[in-house]
Amino acid sequence: MAETLNSLPAADGFRMPAEWEPHAGCWMIWPERADNWRAGGGPGQAAFAEVAATIARFEPMTMLVSAGQWANARALLPPAVRLVEAGTDDAWCRDSGPSFLTDAHGRLRGVDWGFNAWGGLYAPFDRDEMVAAKVLETERAPRYRAPLVLEGGSIHVDGEGTVLTTEECLLNPNRNPGLSRAEIEQHLKDYLGVSTVIWLGAGLVHDETSGHIDNIACFVRPGVVALTWCDDPADPQYAISRDAYERLSKARDARGRNIEVVKLPLPGPLFRREDEAIEIDSGGTMSRHFGERLGGSYVNFYIGNGLVLMPFLDPAHDEEARAILAGLFPDRTVIGLPTREILLGGGNIHCITQQQPAGVPG
Amino acid sequence: MAETLNSLPAADGFRMPAEWEPHAGCWMIWPERADNWRAGGGPGQAAFAEVAATIARFEPMTMLVSAGQWANARALLPPAVRLVEAGTDDAWCRDSGPSFLTDAHGRLRGVDWGFNAWGGLYAPFDRDEMVAAKVLETERAPRYRAPLVLEGGSIHVDGEGTVLTTEECLLNPNRNPGLSRAEIEQHLKDYLGVSTVIWLGAGLVHDETSGHIDNIACFVRPGVVALTWCDDPADPQYAISRDAYERLSKARDARGRNIEVVKLPLPGPLFRREDEAIEIDSGGTMSRHFGERLGGSYVNFYIGNGLVLMPFLDPAHDEEARAILAGLFPDRTVIGLPTREILLGGGNIHCITQQQPAGVPG
């Protein structure tokens, strides 16, 4: 059944599981637009392929790919990665894909949020707007259409009633100018099955998504949040991270717990090299210029079945960050992949993946 | 797993099940090319939608649809029909889709045949050539790539070791000019898991597929074949059907049985009306002219779970044909749908459907 429901997920007994709960698989989108991915897309595609191939060792992986890129993607991906055709505007399945939900009976459904290309980074975005519906169709999972512009990267849930997000993004007039904070909170409760919203202020410095939570902080288990940290008072990230720390220290989650904060080092700071700017087709509307600061963060990792897949971005901090994550996820293999090419396109591993929790569509 | 295997299905223990064996579902392709489907595609789409909606009452149905037609198809199809994006060159899933196989352990795989648009009815056909691989990818079913140009409509199997086909099609130099009859027979045995090939001569008169078996005759159960019959000696179909009858009467199937032949009346003869010709975009390479004879046949039906879905083409014969099929399939609901609009595009219900037998991909 590829049904669109008019009821509310929470009222139907559905909630968004935490990313660490068991998955049926993972979804990604094959990158190709040459005004975002340098050198015609090849280096970005190689990085996406390595992410997909690695996750596919741990759980079923599906890559959405345009008709024109089918043969290229098929050649660059291992057989274990399933391809499904879908024309898209770019390759951020965390944001254009659905947020999957489950209920106590093990049923699977999904939320199709409104999508406006992160407040207008590019146009048109009609094909990205269709991605969530197409993913849900393919899985025969019933679909809730939420009356809210939201990308999956702007929320993190603990699976026990709490959602973590940022004011910079969810209260940004470029998303839902007609909705109040209270109305947005109510939609989060209705569509994610949560009862508590924890608001951080700003997201990572120079994050073009208007401060997605998934590039600055995330739950690693109920009651514990990993936060990107910066010790340099001259860095604008310094104050942002301190503000986030203070808000988290004062917060209580849906179960009444205090939040323990684990600091992850900030890589870099990282800047775009000249070749990484000039190899991008002109005409794009996204900022891709030589010398600009890149929104790199170790918190932008993916939790799969038995796996944590994290970006490696800076030899000075990669191993330190991996050791912290290994301590936080003792039962999972923590793998670091060099993902600067993904960062150059505007995000990282968490942004390009979308978990599908275990469940039977219904 | 979306694997391509280099072994032979028969050697791996796989065979193509008969169409009456239990299905996991059915696949179709949404029609849209205006140089084949009259009036911009609308009447044909309405007929396809009715076929899909009817089958979806009996088994899961998936419709492949281009990105451009997604919204239109979604609006015209009931929620029970799953959409999956795929750009194609036309809408004949029997012919561009895979032939699914199963083994004794209930595993599901599929054959991806070579495809050349029925010996060259149109070009390009590269997107149709990809349909089988895409269907198998979506189902995560391992794929055999056969070294043979063949459309699913040119074969019928009894599920017990016998395949029925025509010389006009399979031996036609527009398909596999480099292969002998013996080599073609060997490929059929290797890829369908059969041991006996029964050859008819020609297919239905004025069938542009070069005589597909599925428009003149089909197994209705092991040992029993339904054959399109014509009692008018002035009709070119008269001699064709008699020749087929004689060949079937002399044949033995893989189990050594004689073949019982059940005659189905020929509708019409049917001819293209003027409006049915002028409403087709010019520029197409297929014959679509006023007054031409149409290859209508009642044998072009689909067997689904608990269902036989047959074309209604001629009020003078529709009920007679339905009564015969109802007698042949006493445990199934026999439904007739008016499908002249599908016939105008070059085929009928069997041509636009592709069953997926029950089985677990592996």
Image: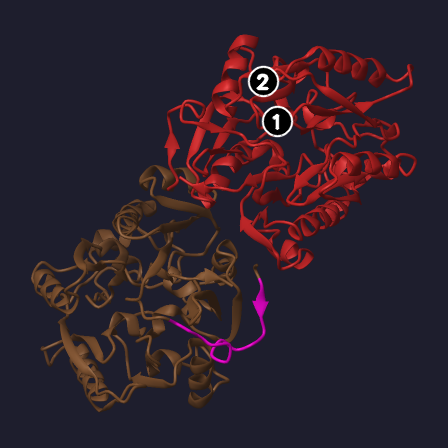
Chain colours: A red, B brown
Q: Tell which subunit mark 1 falls on.
A: A
- The residue drawn where x is 85% and y is 28% is A265
Type of amino acid at the residue the image marks with label 2: Ala
Q: Tell which subunit mark 2 falls on.
A: A
- B62 vs B352, nearest the viewer: B62
* Quarter of the figure with residue A308: top right
Sort mark 2 into few (<14), some (14-19) or many (20+) by Cα contacts within 10 Å.
many
Label 2: element kind: loop
Instruction: Give a yes or no on whether discs 1 and 2 share a subunit.
Output: yes
Asked whether the beta carbons under mark 1 and mark 2 sit within 8 Å of each other, the answer is yes
Q: Earlier in the sequence, mark 1 or mark 2?
A: 1
Type of amino acid at the residue the image marks with label 1: Asp
Label 1: element kind: loop
Quadrant of the frame with the N terminus of chain B: bottom right
- A61 vs B118, nearest the viewer: A61
* Quarter of the figure with residue B105: bottom left
| Residue topped by disc 1 | A158
Residue B31 visible, this orientation: no
In the image: residue B312, left or right of residue A283: left
| Residue topped by disc 2 | A254
The stretch drawn in magenta includes residue B11: yes
- The image shows residue B200 at horizontal and vertical percentages of 28, 83
The residues tagged by marks 1 and 2 sit, at their Cα atoms, a distance apart of 9 Å
- A166 vs B270, nearest the viewer: A166
Secondary structure mainly formed by the magenta segment: loop
On residue B26, which mark appears? none
The magenta region covers: B3-16
- The image shows residue B360 at horizontal and vertical percentages of 46, 60
Q: Is residue B218 above or below residue B245?
A: above
